[in-house]
Image: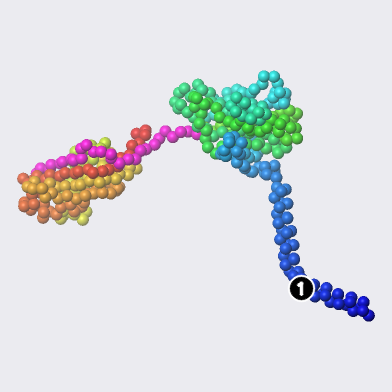
Amino acid sequence: MFEKGLIKKEANMFQEEKRKTNYGAICLVCFFSCFFAFQFMKLVTTQPLTTSSISVIDSPKSSHKLSDRRELWRVSPPSTYCLKIESFRKFATSPNVEKYESRPFQSGGYNWTLIVYPKGNIKEGAPRDWVSMYVQIDNSTLLNSPKEVYAEVKFFIYNRKEDKYFTYQETDAKRFFLFKPYWGYGNVRSYGDVANPDAGWLFDGDNVLFGVDVFVTEVFNKWEVFSFTKSLHNRLYKWTITNFSSLEKQYYVSDKFVIGGRSWALKVYPSGDGEGQGNSLSLYVVAVDVKPYDKIYLKAKLRIINQRDSKHVEKKVESWSDQANSWGFQKFVPFADLKDTSKGLLVNDTLKIEIEFEDFSNTKYFPS
């Protein structure tokens, strides 16, 4: 009886402990453990660059710092030039073999050669036992203008296992000039990897196919320079109109004059223009010989001279040009003031107009 009572007591204690256990928390912990384990296995088993034709990596191999080098698979073959080296391993291990240089080929109007170092361009600091690839422009083509050429360059090695071309390229065009007519990579791929039959770079026995694309980018030869006037040695232009009361045309234009390297003219409407017609004299300054795409800024003072004292009628203009490339006022001075002899604006039927330039813009186009 005593043993049965003890067993029953222990069973009750086990049930009590079982009720205290938080099985929901245990299940939650198990779920997250399985989830993170799955993600870790997924990350470990991912193989970059072996199955995708669009995989791209940044490669720091071409210098001691990160470069703009890109490496990717490509299905299409090179479009500029290919070099197939048969018996590649025999060539690479032959005595006194340093490099193979292709015949000249043309791209962008220039002659180029493809150069392959099977075991590295040691003299230029490339790592030993690494395949180096360069493209070189013919110096004789640089003796005439231009003195330098910019080109986008891509290098290729064919891989039979992928049946694709592994591509090496930069994001920027490269500069070729007399003192450095070549450019490339000293560390395209290790010789051991290329010479390994299982890696796929060798095909049809011992052949390796190299390639290059050279796209010459034209340097701009048309440009423009926009600037403001730095100094004006002659700021004033004066225009005298005689027999003003006898003027019958709608408007009159002064002789063309040059200030600050730009041609100008003054334009007056004796009977008024626009809102000034019939009540005011209209006065403008006009930019002459302007190209249709010119945009001109002008800051100047237009004046009608008081011929009796210094109380001139003066108005300022400061703005960008309109479609007519003119600046001025439809109501520059009322007819009443113009005909008032005490104002001194019209003396002996003579009108004196003046413009003072303070600042304006100029645009030079090359070629003009």
Going 74% across and 70% down the picture, which residue do you hit? 22
- The vertical placement of 328 against 187, above or below, is below
Location of residue 322 in the rendering, given as x and y in whole percent from the top left corner: 29, 48
Q: Helix or strand or loop: what does disc 1 sit on?
A: helix
In this picture, residue 288 sits left or right of residue 134: left
In this picture, residue 126 sits left or right of residue 28: left
Going 12% across and 44% down the picture, which residue do you hit? 352
Going 12% across and 46% down the picture, which residue do you hit? 305
Residue designated by label 1: 20
Q: Nearer the viewer, residue 6 or 204?
A: 6
Location of residue 318 in the rendering, given as x and y in whole percent from the top left corner: 26, 49
Which residue is situated farthest in the top direction here? Answer: 96
- The vertical placement of 264 against 273, above or below, is above
Q: How is the image coloured?
A: rainbow
Is 41 one of the magenta-colored residues? no
Going 67% across and 37% down the picture, which residue do you hit? 164
Is 223 one of the magenta-colored residues? yes
Location of residue 320 in the rendering, given as x and y in whole percent from the top left corner: 30, 48
Location of residue 315 in the rendering, given as x and y in whole percent from the top left corner: 19, 50
Category of crowding for the residue at label 1, using alpha-carbon neighbours closer than 10 angstroms: few (below 14), some (14–19), many (at least 20): few
Read off the magenta span: 217-243
